[in-house]
Image (spheres, helix red, strand yellow):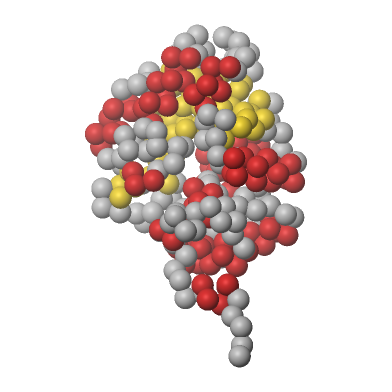
Amino acid sequence: MARHSSADSSVSLRYDRALLLSEKKRNQVLDLWEVQKYGVDSFGDADYVCLYGLRPSDWFARGVRLLARTAVECTRDRLAELIGRDVADLARAAHVNGGCVVIDPFAGSGNTLYWILRSLPKSKAIGFESDDRIFSLSRRNLSIVGVQIELVQGDYVSGLKSLAISPDEFIVAFVAPPWGDALSEISGLDLRRTRPPVVEIVDLITSTYKQNMILSAIQVYELIDPSSLAELKAKFDWSTLRIYDINAPGKNHGLFLGAKGWTN
């Protein structure tokens, strides 16, 4: 009797967001075929999950590995590169003299930090990751691709307060907490229902570094709950919203950029 591999028995499953975030699957390390199937089933592209400037087959061959939930929650290259460019343009517009520190409270794969550093190469990059398995994999992955990111194991709340940042340093805070059930196909992304809520993270950063100029770069979705967006806008001296037209209509991500302590 023929034996079937796990790939054979799973090939009929639809590899979408719901499956990869399910309790059964979310903490499993994905095989290459699963990463590619997620890309095909969800976006019609086997190379959708490009990271660190590499296609899935290339980063997998080099030893990079992802949990299922990281594959869903990571910011892929095409989007991360656009975010990095827009963040860098605004950082330069702020006429930074004291250097730049880029902070990611939810580092995950670290891919967004990777691309921001490519556009702001003289910056310091610090990412926090509280999940032990994601931290271990991401630290190994970042070492494989040779990027200089300080990945800190632990909660961002206590971690932010322990950072030694001088008042003349410009802070870029990339904020992308897990969306969980905050994203609805009908009403879009409710920024108050992310885990934790986006405004809560913004308040902690701005209250911790009151003397610094801060640029908050918050990953959003094409459709956003208007009340949650208005609440977020009220936290900044200046803000803008950019949607990146790189997916099918209605499935695009974007970036909310907000300035605190300076204006564009």
Residue in view at x 46 percent, y 27 percent: 216
Describe residue 201's horizontal placement relative to residue 66 as left or right: left
Image coordinates for residue 132, horizontal then vertical, percent = 59, 40
Q: Is residue 60 above or below residue 228?
A: below
Quarter holding the C terminus is: top left
| Residue 12 in sight here | yes
Decide if residue 85 is in sight here.
no
Location of residue 109 by image quarter: top right
- Is residue 133 found left or right of 257 in the rendered image? right
On the rendered image, what quadrant is the N terminus found in? bottom right
User: Residue drawn at (46%, 20%), measured in percent from left and top?
Assistant: 205
Question: Which residue is at the front of the view, 41 or 246?
Answer: 41
Write down the quadrant of residue 228 in the picture. top left
The x and y percentages for residue 128 are 57, 31
Residue at 44%, 55% (x, y): give it: 23
Q: Residue at x 66, y 37 (%)?
A: 118
Query: In front: 246, or 55?
Result: 55
Residue 65 coordinates in the image, percent (x, y): 65, 53
Q: For this view, does 237 lie left or right of residue 35? A: left
**x and y percentages locating residue 134 in the rendered image:** 59, 44
Q: Is residue 198 above or below residue 110?
A: above
Could you say which is closer to the camera, residue 169 or residue 133?
A: 133
